[in-house]
Amino acid sequence: MGGVQLPRTTRSTAGFTPEHVDSLVSVLDLVRSGTARTRPEIGRRSGLGRTVVTQRVNQLIDRGLLEEGELGPSSGGRAPRELRFRARAGVILAAELGATSIGAGVTDLAGTVLAEHEEAADIAQGPERILGRVEELFDELLTQVRASGGPRSIWGVGIGLPGPVEFATGRPSAPPIMPGWDGYPVRDRFTTRYNAPVWVDNEVNAMALGELRAGSARGQRDILYIKIGTGIGSGLVSGGRLHRGSQGCAGDIGHAAVADDTEVVCRCGNTGCLEAYAGGAAIARDGEAAAREGRSEYLAGVLADAGRVTAADVARAAQSGDRTSVELLTRAGRLVGSLLATLVSFYNPALVIIGGGVAGAGDLLLAAVRESVYRRSLPLATRELRITRSTLSDRAGLVGAAFMVIDELFTAERLAHWVEAGAPAGRPSLVEVPLRTPLF
């Protein structure tokens, strides 16, 4: 990592013991999450003694991570002073790259988006062009935030990519729709540019994390996030933690086989993949075929006017009552639902969240997914199962990429390396600090 040497121990330069750091993290997490707002509440929630709570709070205030606010409600004695996490102490740069779009943003340390931008882009243009544009957007958004009096210090960078990512190295691994990206050092590039810790993950994992931290999955522990966009993927949360698998490619359902047909070739090179039949590109392909063959007057008009048919066009046609488009979306939903039913019976989540551009096109596809899942899954697995649309919509991946960084920075092992300085800015080697228990 640019020659930066890691400390030999997980203790900070101040000589904090692991127990000391654990108690600091416990206090900080209680305030960051809003679970406790006063010193007495922290003591009750954490089990720490009054003296220890006072010491840890003072240390966190001295280092600029907490601040005192208004007087809280009194329980009979002197009213306690409320505590607040200083979410504006720094910023996180976050980006979600899809097959056909770039979303970039700047958030505070609580994951609140301070500035953002989204634009169309083709991921197949390659890493140099796409990541160069991401850097331009980051710089423009940072200028906006700083001009409005926002935080200046960059605490970390989070990137979501539309393909398999080896999480340990931050490099894409043979991504089917990303020619020229295999093994590209995404983490190293942003580390060099911003001199901050950088984490890179699959975009669907970022979306799942965004829903878990700030969306419809808050408070849940076992969820499945299904993205139906140009491609199809899923993110798995088990016991409140994102499950990446041993190499980082858990949840790649888009390339699971759902048919024996050898004529439809997926972008990954195989045949029979779910994505090749139910993804946005597949719906657009079949919609355009229907237009050319005269099976849909609505889509034929779209093709004549625009020269092509998109999945969004098919969704609009379905909402207008076009029978062929209704059949296309219903078929796609049933295929997704059939595979999802297997996952529901196998994994038994409490919540399934459907997101992505195609999923947001209307209720027709979602209804078809639900029908297949409830019909084909084990009754016990679906007894309390909820299947719902994403509440964060297009923001899920962006917010999740920011929370990926925030969660990693505030682990006890990493906090021990930067708490004395008050910020992790300028410490890119934090990504290499080993965790006692893997976070995700």
Image (cartoon, grey):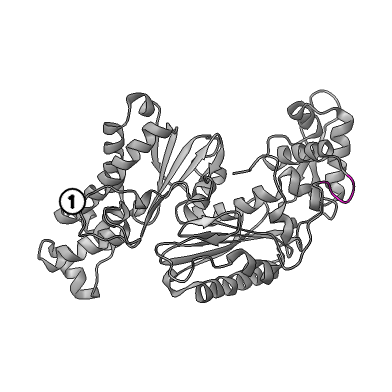
Task: Provide the residue span drawn in magenta.
Answer: 11-15
Query: At 60% from the left edge and 58% from the top edge, which residue is drawn?
Result: 169
- Residues 429 and 108: in front is 429
Q: Is residue 14 above or below residue 96?
A: above
Q: Amino acid at mark 1?
A: Glu
Q: Position of residue 269 (x, y in %)?
A: 32, 62
Q: Is residue 241 above or below residue 403?
A: above
- Is 298 situated left or right of 284 in this image? left
Q: Position of residue 91 (x, y in %)?
A: 68, 60
Query: At 58% from the left edge and 63% from the top edge, which residue is drawn?
Result: 105
Q: Is residue 311 above or below residue 124?
A: above
In what quadrant of the picture does the C terminus appear?
top right
Mark 1 lies on residue: 327
The answer to which quarter of the image holds residue 310 is bottom left
Helix, strand or loop: magenta stretch: loop
- Is 353 situated left or right of 432 in this image? left
Q: Is residue 12 magenta?
A: yes
In what quadrant of the picture does the N terminus appear?
bottom right
